[in-house]
Amino acid sequence: MTSDGIELVVEVASPLNPSRGALLMCHPNPTGGGMMDSHVYKKAANRLPALADLTIVRFNTRGTSSEQGTSSGSYDQTKLEEHDVDAMVEYCLDHLKLENFWVVGWSFGTELTLKYAKDQRIKGVILLSPPLMYTTEEELKFWAADGRPVIALVPEHDEYLSPALAKEKFAIIPQIEIIEGVNMKHLWLGEPSVQFVHDEIVRRVVPEKYPLPTEI
């Protein structure tokens, strides 16, 4: 439960082996159909515990629905969602006791990540298709001063923020690493796009498991 009384729907996918790292996944905008089951995240939960010994934590922000259920409350365009992120980070670190803990945001979820995933126990953040629609310059300056890894995967044909524009807007963060997804789009549709995203995440979080196998 969040500090303002919201019940969040959560799912944890854990490896059979000892966990080598953990990812908290902040999903795309629910007004466009984003949820914890958005395909890159659901496939991560299905694959990465076995392939990379990663713990995957997914959740629905307030008012968001998926097959697992609907979180209480109402969508608030990144504002009250601060409480959702705070509650999930606390749950992952204080209750689940996860280590080598990273936060991954996708689209709308990157805004929540940049704004609120600031707990000093977080190892770094990974941004998928960041639109930078709600994140302020002051919030970017926080990451510049903080120094922890900020990795942005930006599709070549992103509909909201191109790789060139991303380099310009993220220039304030000296440690930013921008990786272009060649021939890819905002939603990362298609298996090559999914594999690219998962591989780049694993390369940062559990490099000894990179690259992921393409056949099992």
Image: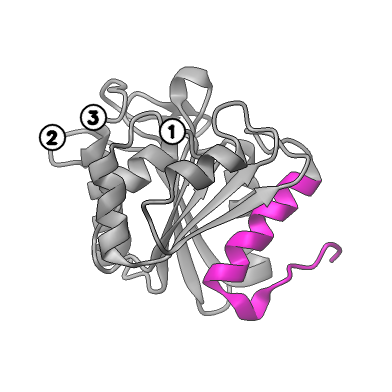
52 horizontally vs 126: left or right: right
**First reached walking from the N terminus: tag 2 or tag 1:** 2
Asked whether 11 falls inside the magenta stretch, the response is no
Mark 2, Cα crowd under 10 Å, few <14 / some 14-19 / many 20+, is few
- Secondary structure mostly taken by the magenta-highlighted segment of the chain: helix
Q: Which amino acid does label 1 sit on?
A: Phe
Q: Disc 2 to disc 3, how far (Cα)?
A: 13 Å
Looking at the image, do the residues carrying marks 2 and 1 touch, with CB atoms under 8 Å apart? no
* Image height of 10 relative to 118, above or below: above
Q: Mark 1 points at which residue?
A: 108
Q: Where is residue 6 in the image (x, y as percent from the top left)?
A: 22, 33
Tell me whether the residue at label 1 lies in contact with that at label 3, contact meaning CB atoms closer than 8 angstroms: no
Question: Image check: 214 left or right of 177?
Answer: right
**Closer to the observer: label 2 or label 3?**
3
Q: How is the image coloured?
A: one colour
Number of numbered discs overlaid on the protein picture: 3
Residue at (60, 42) in percent of width and height: 163
Badge 2 is on which residue? 4
> Residue 66: which numbered mark, if any?
none
Instruction: Give the mark nearer the N terminus: 2 vs 3.
Output: 2
Q: Position of residue 17 (x, y in %)?
A: 57, 78
Looking at the image, residue 90 sits to the left or right of residue 32; the answer is left
Q: Please identify, in this view, whether the residue under mark 2 or under mark 1 is nearer the observer.
A: 1
Q: Tell me the element at label 1.
A: helix
As displayed, is residue 193 above or below residue 49? above
